[in-house]
Image (tube, rainbow, N blue to C red):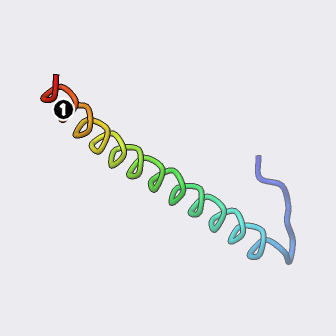
Amino acid sequence: MMPELGKYAGAVLSSYAVALGLLAVIVGLSLWRAARVKRALDAVEARQEGKR
């Protein structure tokens, strides 16, 4: 299933590993920020409920 990469195998596989790692970091940061923004929005909405 794996194509023959020859002498470039190390470079190609390490490039894939770096790309996958960066994607994982981006997804993790996106989820972390979404949770932080949701908490902030919930706090604003709770304050709005108290004013009514």
Amino acid at pointer 1: Ala
Total numbered labels = 1
Seen in the image, is 50 located left or right of residue 31?
left
Seen in the image, is 47 located left or right of residue 22?
left
Q: Nearer the viewer, residue 44 or 4?
A: 44
Q: Nearer the viewer, residue 18 or 40?
A: 40
Q: Nearer the viewer, residue 1 or 18?
A: 18
Farthest top residue in view: 52
Q: Residue at x 46, y 56 (%)?
A: 29
- Percent x, y of residue 28: 45, 53
Q: Residues within 10 Å of mark 1 (few under 14, many from 20)?
A: few
Residue at numbered disc 1: 46
Farthest front residue in view: 52
Q: Nearer the viewer, residue 28 or 7?
A: 28
Secondary structure, mark 1, is helix
Q: On the image, which quarter does residue 11 sit in?
A: bottom right
- Percent x, y of residue 41: 31, 38
Q: Residue at x 37, y 45 (%)?
A: 37
- Percent x, y of residue 34: 41, 44
Q: On the image, which quarter does residue 26 sit in?
A: bottom right
Q: Quadrant of the C terminus?
A: top left
